[in-house]
Every structure is written in structure tokens, then in C-alpha cells.
Image: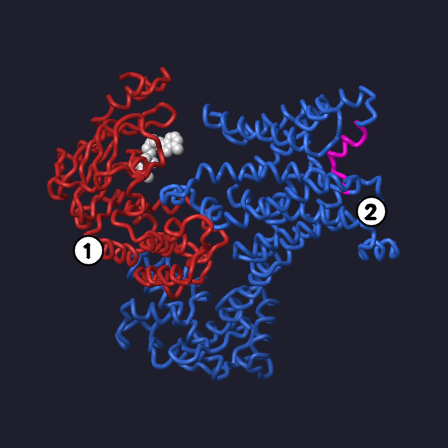
Amino acid sequence: MQQALAEFFSFSDPNIRYVLLGTLLLTGSAAMIGSFALLRKKVLVGDAVAHAVLPGVCLAFIITGTKHPVPLSLGASITGWLALVSIDQITNRSKIKEDTAIALVLSVTFGLGILLLTAIQHTGNAEQVGLSNFLFGKAAALVSDDLKTLALLGLMLIIIVLLFFKEFTLVAFDKAFAQASGLPVRRLELLLTSLTVLAIVVGIRAVGILLMAVMLITPPAAARFWTNHLPTMVLLAAVLGMIAGLAGSFVSYIAPAMPTGPWIVMTISVVAYGSFLLAPRRGLLARRIRQRKHQKKTLTENILKLFYELGVTEGSVGTKRTLYDLLKSRSMPTSRLVAGLKRLQKHKMLQQEGLGWRLTAAGSRKGKEISQRHHLWKLYLTQHLKTEADHTHEDAESIEHIITPELAEELRGLVKLPVTGKSTTQHTHWTFEGAGQGQPVKTPAGE
Amino acid sequence: MIQRTDNPVVEIHDLTVSYYKKPVLWDINLCLPQGKVIGIIGPNGAGKSTLLKAIMGLVIPDNGYIKLFGKSLDEVRKQVSYVPQKESVDWDFPASVLDVVVMGRYAQLGLFQRPKKLDQEKALECLNKVSMAPLAHRQIAQLSGGQQQRVFLARALAQEAQLYLMDEPFVGVDVATEKMIIDLLQTMAREGKTIIVVHHDLQSAAHYFDWSMLLNMRTVAVGPTQDVLTPALLQETYGGKLTILSKINDLLKEQEVSPRELT
Ligand SMILES: Nc1ncnc2c1ncn2[C@@H]1O[C@H](COP(=O)(O)OP(=O)(O)O)[C@@H](O)[C@H]1O
Ligand SMILES: [Mg+2]
């Protein structure tokens, strides 16, 4: 294994170099054009085209009797194209929806393809051996003749995408606007779909008909998790596609009997699931961590607010309070409360004394700030959104934890504050000197 | 009531548009003057969006013609700017606010030309006009409805057109944005630009628009707002008077013929 690895990656064998270069161009270009298919939500069409390629390949073989890449690719393009046109016509001329049209075309063309393939295999023609490689792809079976053609096509594809990048972007984002501003949208779409057909025709040699759609879609879908910048996304998609291509051609090298497509697809799928889990911000894990952080923040803020408000009602904010005191005023699971208290103690917001806890100066400031945010939001709801006062509390309970100091400032400008003294006992602490205007007190859990 | 006007910016003559043979606009006739904010008002499904799309050449009419500045659309396209409904795009697209506004410059740039520094500056300037410059590098996925609408508006401004067609720019935006937009549109009108706005709130229409068009599959009225937004005409637009027309539509659809084939 190690030796095979070393041999493969030394690229000394010209055959390896060809196969590798070819595969990289195929997978890379498919991923690039696939990015636009993904953004235009034309994913399924790609799948239908990939399947529709099979009858074209078989017909080309029947007519020419050779496996030369040019006629085969030509045949493939023609039936792939016809499939596209049929889907378009069916959706435009009848009430059949696009997904149904796609399913129809896909099954009919692929059925036809399999029929032809079986027929060819029964003729006993020696040339036909290897035709079934189209189904699952076999990078190792690519001979240098194939590779020259395919690499050229792949390169052409990449160049065209780069040339029309700006136009393709606009068409993908806002077709109506593109058309209204005078871009030749119909022709651009035609070009995009033709390039998709081309990418499929080129790519099936390595990936295979059955799995080709995955190679169009998965690399850009994975790349999307890592970036919000379209050029970066397209580039990254190409790189991810190439990594999968590399893995595939390596397997093809050490186990020539093995089809390449499944390996390429497995690799890219692992990459995609990895991205889905691990990507910063958009990834599942990052989202979970954010949620957890928010929960912790909510908990500690609630405890501080509880301390503060109990203090205000009783007239002394610094009072020591036991677990029992706290639970009496606000029910929550004891274990969570204890965890929150410990965290606050660590961040010097609370101070433990015997069986009880007491607010520190910092804790008291913070508690006051949260309590004010709560009431600000309630006031805003009642005064500006005309919400019934008794419905505002629950809403404020969640909103108080997400209001930023800047937003609190803005709210303060919007709401009419109750005049101190005249207000109810609940609100006697309603004064605003300083709080929230200076540096915000650091939230312990927000770090 | 169809008010005539000299040197109209938009002139529509006998326009009929259908989808799948079902007509949604019947024999539209109108002339719209320059330098005004003009509202197109009508109930849901009245064909307001379709009318804008027909003007922009996005749907092919069965019949009739449209002239902009007395010419065909293709001759004056650079002077016309279209703002689609903001729901018509996927805001999860990987682009920043600035990227989207720069798209307003693409047509001027032409094929193969990358946006230049000047285009970026223009775009920033337009963002500034809608108070969005501080958010220039924000992802569009993170914008609120009001901010999305401002971005679309900035993109239109970046086209530096003379005629603006806006589809429901006040839907799903906050009060502050609505006020900002209408102020901006009125300023632009004073500078001689013509702004056509699809709108469906009657209350604000009376204050916002110099001219109004009442539309419900056909032109009910076009003219200065105070002449158009009358109880009788509103009743005609929103009331049940169009039942005959809809019945004919259904019949046509059953027969699978379009009005073009009838004439
Ligand atoms: N692409 C379409 N295909 C079929 N029917 C459509 C299409 N777009 C709009 N319609 C129909 O045309 C009519 C007018 O639509 P529209 O112009 O969007 O109205 P409005 O903008 O006034 O609400 C509606 O009945 C709508 O269902
Ligand atoms: Mg509409």
C-alpha cells in the first residue's frame, strides 16, 4: 500500500500522469459549472441529462463500431441535449411540473440506453468490452487518446466559465433583472446548459452516468458551507472536486478492476458531510455551539437579573441569597441553577458566602442592565407595537438576552420612560444614569 | 378615465398579455408623463407585475405595442431600470451587498469587462443614498426585508436610468425604510426622472403618488392621483364588476385559444 502510494504520487509513470491530469480536469470543471447549476436550482436537470447520455453513447457505438472518444462524446451530447429540450418543452407546453418532466425523461432515456447496451453486449462484438464502464466510470481505462480530447474539453469549459463569470452570476441570482438590463439571458442560459451537458459528457468517463450528478452538485454544495463569496466558492468547489478525482484515480491505479465513480463520489460525500458538520458559522457543529452559548448566557443573565430584581423589591441589592431563596422566586432545575451560580462566581459576578451567594459590584451592574433591557423591550412593545401589556413579559424574557448595548440605546430613544417616583413599585429602580452608556459589562458566557 | 399627456415617457397601446392562453391584461391603453412618481394600483392578481414585465420585455404580449420615450425598449434600454419584487430572488445567494449593487453596472460594462474601481465607487455612492453604505460588505443573507429593498433600490440607482419601474417596493419593509424610499423617489422625480411603482395600499397611495393608474386586468383609470382615487373608480377596480371578463377568460382557457387568435 505504502509503496503504491509512493509510486502513484511520484507521478513518474506517464500513464498515471495522464489519467490524473484528465481526472482532475474532469472533476474540476464539472464542479465549476455545477456551482451555477446549484445556484440556479437546476440540480435535477443535470441528473436527467447524465442518464440521457447513455443511449447516445450506445447509438454512436452502433453506428461507428469504435469506442473513439469523439463520436461517443458527440452521441452523448446529442441525446443529453435532446433530453434537456424535451424537459423544457414538456414544462413550457403543458401543465406538467418540472420535477415530473425530469423523472419522465430520465427513466425513458435511461431505459432506452440500457436496452441498447444490452443489445450491443449480445452481439459479441469484441470492441464493446468496456462500454459498460460508462455506467460507473473507470479512470484507469482512459487511454491517452481519450484524455487529450477530454482534457481539451475540460479546459475549454473552465475558460468559458471564467469568461462569462459575471454574466452567469447575474443570471443565477436575478434572471429578470439580467434580462431587463439587456443581457442576452436566453443565450447565456443556453450556454450554461450546453456547458452542463458538456461537463457531464466529459465527466462520465471518470465518474460514470449513475453518479455524475453528484459530481456536479456535491463539490459546490460543500464549498458553500465554507464561504459566502461566489468566486471563492467556485474555486473551492473545483478544488474539492479535484481532491475527489485524485482519490478516485488512485484507487483506479491500485485496483484496476474497481470502478472509479463510487470512490470519487464517496470521497466527495465525506468532504461534504464534513463541511456540513464542521464548517464555521454555517456548519451544524458551529450552530450547536452558538446555541449552547446562548443558552448559557440566558441562564446566567436570568440569575443575575433575579438577584438584582429581588434586591430592588426588598430595597437592598447586596443581600445574600440561598438556593432556596432563589428557587422560591423563580423555578428552574436546581442543577442548572447551581451550574449558573458557579459560572457567575468564576466570572466574579457573584460571591459565595457559606450557603448563599451575593452580587458583586460588577454583578449588580450587569443585573441592572439586563433588567433594564427587559423593561425597555416591554415598553417598546406596549408603546410602539400596541401589544397588550400582559402579553409582553414572555417576549421580553427572550428578547432581553439578545438586545445589544447599541440597540438598547436606540430603544431608550424611542420609548417614553415612566417618570421616576410616580411609577409603580416594580419600577422604582428605573433610572438610567450611566448604565449601558459606557463600556458594556462583559457577559461571562459570551466570551 | 384615461388622461392623455403630451410627450409621454411610457405609451401603451392596446396591450394584451396572457399566460398559457389565459389573458391577464386586456387592451391596456395609457400614457404616462415625465418627472412624476406614478402608482399602479389594483387588487392581487390584477396583473400589475405582469404590466411591468411587459414593459420590460420579460413577457411577450399577444397584441399591442409599448413605447418608451417614443422609442422601442431596445433603443432606450440603458435609460430604463427595473426593480423586481424582492421575493423573486433567493437571498441566500453567496454575495455581499456591494456585489449586488455592482450588478447594476453590468449592462454598462458589457461582456467580458470586469467591474472596475469606478463601478465600485458608484455602487457605494448609491448605497449611501439609501443609507446602506455601512453594510456594504455584509452578506445579503443577513439583511432584513427593509434592507433587502434598499439594496435593490441602490442597484437600480447604479444603473443611472431615467425611468424606473418598481414592483412592490413597500412590501415587507419597515416604516423608516418606506419613508426613506418615498422621499428618495420624490426627490428623483423632481430631478426629472419618472418612477412607476406597483403598490397596493390605498391609504398611502393618495399621499405618495403624483399620478395613479387603477388596474384590474384592464385600465380602470389613469391620471393625476386626486382624479383617479375616487370612490367610484376604486369600487370599479376592487368591486365585482369584472365578473364578465373573468367568465370570458375561463371560457377562453377551456377552448385553448388566445385573444390573438380571435381577431
Ligand atoms: N408565470 C406565470 N404563469 C402563469 N400565470 C401567471 C404567471 N404570473 C402571473 N400569473 C397570473 O397572472 C395574473 C396576474 O398576475 P400578476 O401580474 O402577478 O398580478 P399582481 O402583480 O397584480 O398581483 C394572476 O392571476 C397570476 O396567477
Ligand atoms: Mg405582483
Please identify which colour was used for chain A in the image.
blue
Q: Is residue A326 above or below residue A180?
A: below
Q: In this orientation, does residue B213 appear?
A: yes
**Residue nearer the viewer, B228 or B257:** B257
In the visual, does A437 lie left or right of B55?
right
**Residue nearer the viewer, B152 or A117:** A117
Q: Quarter of the image containing the C terminus of chain A? A: bottom right
Residue at 62% across, 43% down? A216
Report if residue A295 lies within the magenta region.
no
- Which chain does the numbered disc 2 sit on? A
Residue behind mark 1: B191
x and y, in percent, of residue A204 in the image:
69, 38
In the visual, does B236 lie left or right of B141?
left
Q: Give the residue type at disc 1.
A: Glu
Asked if disc 1 and disc 2 are in contact, CB closer than 8 Å, the reply is: no
In the visual, does A382 lie left or right of A220?
left
- Which chain does the numbered disc 1 sit on? B
Mark 2: is the Cβ under 8 angstroms from ligand 1?
no
The residue range painted magenta reads A128-139
* Image quadrant assignment for residue A282: bottom right
Residue at 51% across, 31% down? A98
Count up the numbered dots. Answer: 2
Residue behind mark 2: A253
Please identify which colour was used for chain B in the image.
red
Q: Give the residue type at disc 2.
A: Tyr
Where does ligand 2 appear, by image quarter? top left
Q: Quarter of the image containing the N terminus of chain A? A: bottom right
